[in-house]
Image (cartoon, helix red, strand yellow):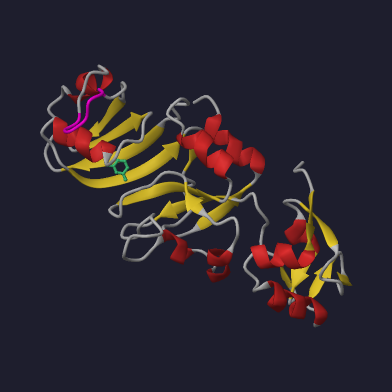
Amino acid sequence: MSKAMMARLDRLLANLGYGSRKDVQALVASGKVMLDGKVLKDSGARIAVDATLPERMTIRGLPVDPPAPLVLIMHKPLGVVCSHKEDGEKIYDLLPRRWRLRDPGLSTVGRLDKDTSGLILITDDGDFLHRVISPKRHVPKTYLATLDRPLAGTEAEVFAAGTLMLDGEEKPLLPAQLDVVDERTARLTITEGRYHQVRRMFAAVGNHVVGLHRERIGGLILPADLEPGQHRILSAEEAEGVFADV
Ligand code: URA
């Protein structure tokens, strides 16, 4: 059960991106906002807000957007960027337009390169985000890497040693697990999130990553039926599954 917080209706709807305080006051006055089947007329009314709100509140006949805290699992397609600032198509462009106006805003939990596909979490919950990326937690992330050259056979040992230094860094990488899939494909599980880490690890052993896909973060696995570009809202319990022992 999620805990209900109280919020003023106009503030709640403005923070969900339905418009300015003035816009949402007009929306309420026009009778387009309903709660438990009744029209809400007072935009200053205090509303109990929890994850069940979209089952109880409609705006112009449609379920209200999910309130914060929100955690999404997305299948990031190739070619989109995770940063708000970088040029090019953004991962946020794949979400409903109104969500860009949410406050608190949505951010990716860590980043995947433009040329990497797979599991990414998106949230407006700063505490959750920091717990997942915290270097203290060592949440494992598993990637399927396609390589330019055949594996030499020594990579698993090199990556597991905990001594590999990446170019320009001063601290060796923590041990990582490599499982060979075939001559040019390997599954790599790392517990850190250094810049371009997987690509740089293979570069350090004389190879080159030509395809990279994240399959898993902690206890969360990319669902097979989640197509590139699609997302799903996780319940609080599902989101916490990222910390499950795996
Ligand atoms: N390592 C990389 O090199 N790229 C990613 O996108 C993720 C991990």
Residue 189 in the image: x percent, y percent? Answer: 35, 30
Residue 158 in the image: x percent, y percent? Answer: 20, 21
What residue range appears in magenta?
166-172
In this view, the residue in front, 191 or 103, is: 103
Q: Dividing the image into 4 quarters, which one contains the N terminus? A: top right
**Residue drawn 31% across and 50% down?**
113
Q: Quadrant of residue 56?
A: bottom right
- In the rendered view, would you say 231 is above or below 24? above
- In the rendered view, would you say 47 is above or below 207? below
**In the visual, does 35 lie left or right of 12?**
right
Residue 28 in the image: x percent, y percent? Answer: 79, 76
In this view, the residue in front, 177 or 44, is: 44
Q: Going by the picture, which residue comes out furthest to the right? A: 38
**Residue drawn 31% across and 32% down?**
188
- In the rendered view, would you say 20 is above or below 105? below
**In the visual, does 188 lie left or right of 33?**
left
**Residue drawn 78% across and 65% down?**
9
For the question of whether residue 123 can be seen, the reply is: yes
Q: Quadrant of ligand 1?
A: top left
Residue 176 in the image: x percent, y percent? Answer: 31, 25
- In the rendered view, would you say 220 is above or below 97? above
Q: Going by the picture, which residue comes out furthest to the bottom? A: 30
**In the visual, does 219 lie left or right of 114?**
right
Q: How many labels does the image show?
A: 0
Question: Residue 141: within the magenta?
Answer: no
**In the visual, does 213 lie left or right of 167?**
right
